[in-house]
Amino acid sequence: MFTPLVQIHPISNFNPHYFSSHNPLIFFTYQLPQNPKTLNYTLSSLNYKRKTPFQTLIKCSQNSDSNSPNWERLIPKDLISAEKILRSIAGATSSPICQFISSPTTFLHSVDSRIKLAWLLVLVMLPARSHIYMRFGLIGFLALLSVWIQPRQVWVDQLGRVTLLSGILFLMLGLGADSAPMVVQSRTPPPSMMGLPSIPPSFDGYSYLLFKVGPLQLTRKGLSVASTSACLTFTIFQSASLCLTTTTPEQLAFALQWFIKPLAYVGVPVAEVILTLLLSLRFINLVFDEVRIVALGIVSRRINWQQLATMETVEVFFTYMRRIFKNIFNHAEQITQAMTVRGFNGDSSSHNIYFSSASSAPMANIVSVMTLLGLIGAAALSEYVLV
């Protein structure tokens, strides 16, 4: 006999079958046997008694699923690629970050390291206890000092990144502090219902809301929180950069030992803390060097990132991280062996640490101390004078 097969053909003007009238995309054809002697009928002799009032047409159109949608064409390609990330990492660590710069010798190089630590402590505490004008003035003072003290290739890179980070933090906190609606509203009745006089409006033009853009609004509370956080972030990063670029690790360790030496009488391991600090400051340079060298090694191999799958790109980055940690651990092992050869047996109190004997300039110390006292006095008076 014959076997019915379901097929879909891009043709038109055919006689529909009973089942094909219910689905215009499916119709039946019949596969005839190969032996013509057993065939007593033809396709034209098949009796189709059911008729439909319409003629089904099947059209073939181009499938648009294979092409990318129109909105995908608007997205810029290669905006974030693996090669750009590695190049940015190598470029960011090329300039000396938190490293001592011996030349050119500036005014801060001749200031005593203990005065520099006092400056760092004051700069961390001032943004939270001073007026908003003092906060922005402190940012400008540190920016001008960085331009004056640090080389151009150093302050252009570091100052730009710290400013960008502080600006993003200022916008997020300033516009998001009071932008969310209050969950709990006040249930106190208005003063007119309680027989009390209404609160008179301000005659000085005071306004809690500074400006509003859609759901985002900047209030005095948001401005205070944003300025404090942004100033504190900028001050911490930039003041630490200024201190580390003009002070050797030995001088910093000596200054910290001078401040915390009285804590040794209450059981604090001062010698161990100072040795750990000294090794950490020495180790920072090795970490940045390894990050830069391994990134440059991957970029120099000219990898065709377009031919790599997503998991292969992730595997390359995991290999990059493993290589960095492996090199860092090798450096740590070499430092341990060098200290063991030089007689260090684990007891920090019995191991002599020889600090740098570089002397400071008396005039530079006097100017630094007087400037620090003047800054503290100006910050204290700003709460009473600037209202």
Image (cartoon, rainbow, N blue to C red):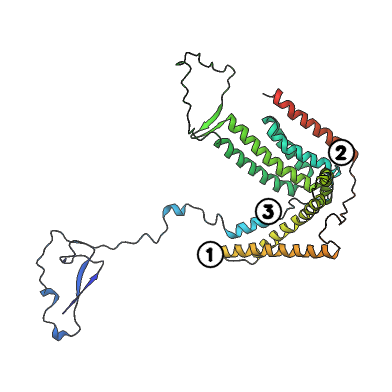
Q: Secondary structure at mark 3?
A: helix
Whole-number angstrom distance, CA of label 3 to CA of label 2:
34 Å
Frontmost residue, 60 versus 289 = 289
From the viewer's perspective, tell me whether residue 15 is left or right of residue 281. left
x and y, in percent, of residue 362 in the image: 90, 39
385 vs 10: above or below: above
Mark 3 lies on residue: 92
Which mark lies nearer to you, 3 or 1? 1
Q: Residue 342: name its quadrant.
A: bottom right
How would you rate the neighbour count of disc 2 (Cα within 10 Å): few for under 14, some for 14-19, many for 20 or more? many
Frontmost residue, 79 versus 379 = 379
Q: Earlier in the sequence, mark 3 or mark 1?
A: 3
Q: Earlier in the sequence, mark 3 or mark 2?
A: 3
Task: Give the amino acid at mark 3.
Answer: Ala
Whole-number angstrom distance, CA of label 1 to CA of label 2:
57 Å
x and y, in percent, of residue 274 in the image: 81, 51
Task: Give the amino acid at mark 2.
Answer: Asn
Asked whether residue 106 appears in the rendered view, the answer is no
Asked whether residue 341 appears in the rendered view, the answer is yes
Q: Secondary structure at mark 1?
A: helix
What residue lies at 75% left-to-right and 47% top-to-bottom? 152
Mark 1 lies on residue: 311
What residue lies at 47% left-to-right and 52% top-to-bottom? 74
Per the rendering, the mark at residue 365 is 2
Whole-number angstrom distance, CA of label 3 to CA of label 1:
26 Å
Name of the residue lying farthest toward the front: 266
What residue lies at 58% left-to-right and 16% top-to-bottom? 203
From the image, which quarter does the C terminus lie in? top right
Q: Secondary structure at mark 2?
A: helix
Task: Give the amino acid at mark 1.
Answer: Met
From the viewer's perspective, tell me whether residue 40 is left or right of residue 146. left
